[in-house]
Amino acid sequence: MKIIKNTTEFYIEEPTAVAIGKFDGFHCGHQKLLHKMQEQKEKGLATVVFTFTPSPAVYFSKESFGELTTIEEKRNVFEKAGIDYLIEYPFDQKIANMEPETFIKEVLVNRIHAKCIVAGEDVSFGRRGAGNYQLLSKKAKDYQYDVVIIEKVQYEGREISSTFVREEVAKGNMELVHQLLGVPYYVGGKIVHGRKLGRTLGMPTINQIPKDTKLLPPRGVYYSYVMYGDRKLPSITNIGVKPTVADQMVMGVETFIYDFKEDVYGEEVEVYLLHYKRAEMRFESVDALMKQMSEDIEEGRKYHMI
């Protein structure tokens, strides 16, 4: 997959199918859209995902929203999905002021060579977000492209959206998040060195430090599994600052993998969160912490049926 970033000066020669969106969370609607992209690829079009960086919402608010999916995680998803080009288009005042039809003509048609545009019903682009799926459809004949509009997917009468998913992640409702996304919510990233306390206690763990922009569920203990390459490894995860043993309030993701003794420092893994077990807490001693960890791990064995 070719990543085009930090520039508006590019040109794709081959005819393409372009998907437009924020792609935060990769909920069921996004997956439906990616499926349509695969159909276009089978018809001979190169597949392009177009997204703004930062998103218009972040740009105009000047604040960072908790991301369900970081840029690195998005790249990984698109790579696995077989997307040919990922465009991380710089969003600034110039692009914000661009007339919607100008965006269609100059960016989608002239630069990306779009012959098919795939988007959700809530797509917006151009000055004041006035560009929408109706305009894409209206201009299709003029600029000789096809349009595929993805209808909203619903869950119990509510549209599945990144906002919906974000609300449930913030509550720790991991089972519902799983239903909305189609897969469990996960934290991807490189394994870093921790305090090695778990190893000292006979419970070695792997550690990740997520990006500040990554939306994490409530601090606490979660039943989980780790994807390491093609291997799915049952695990239990603590999200938080480890108040019993840590002096600095640094958010981390610490995971104990059952019956696993390999050295994976520096490797990229994904930790999928299945069920919220309990809140993070401060213990009166390391011995008390160790006792609770042992209980958590044993209950996790029952959860995973191992």
Image: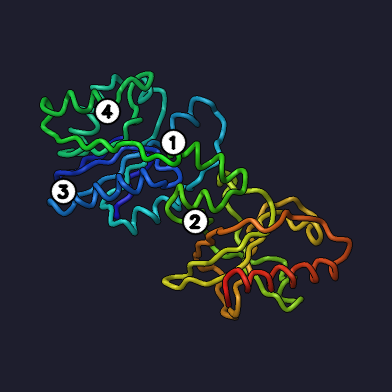
Q: Quadrant of residue 9?
A: top left
Identity, as a three-letter code, of the amino acid under mark 2: Pro
Task: Say left or right for 175 vs 276.
Answer: left
First in sequence: mark 3 vs mark 1: 3
First in sequence: mark 3 vs mark 2: 3
- Give the class, few, some or many, for how many residues have Cα within 10 Å of label 1's Cα (few <14, many ≥20): few
Q: Compare residues 283 and 66 and report the one nearer the observer.
A: 283
How far apart, in angstroms, are the residues tagged by discs 3 and 2?
A: 31 Å
First in sequence: mark 2 vs mark 1: 1
First in sequence: mark 4 vs mark 1: 4
Residue 218, above or below 224: above
Q: Which mark is residue 133?
A: 4
Residue 263, above or below 221: below
Q: Which mark is residue 184?
A: 2
How far apart, in angstroms, are the residues tagged by discs 4 and 2?
A: 30 Å
How far apart, in angstroms, are the residues tagged by discs 3 and 4?
A: 21 Å
Q: Which residue is mark 1?
A: 157
In the rendered image, residue 100, in percent from the top left (x then y), is placed at 28, 22
Image quarter hosting the C terminus: bottom right
| Disc nearest the viewer among 4 and 2 | 2
| Disc nearest the viewer among 3 and 2 | 2
- Give the class, few, some or many, for how many residues have Cα within 10 Å of label 2's Cα (few <14, many ≥20): some
Identity, as a three-letter code, of the amino acid under mark 4: Tyr
Image quarter hosting the N terminus: bottom left
Identity, as a three-letter code, of the amino acid under mark 1: Gly
Q: Contact (CB < 8 A) between labels 2 and 1?
A: no
Q: Compare residues 62 and 136 and report the one nearer the observer.
A: 136
Q: Which residue is mark 3?
A: 45
Q: Answer whether residue 113 is visible to the viewer in this image.
A: no
Q: Contact (CB < 8 A) between labels 4 and 2?
A: no
Q: Compare residues 226 and 125 and report the one nearer the observer.
A: 226
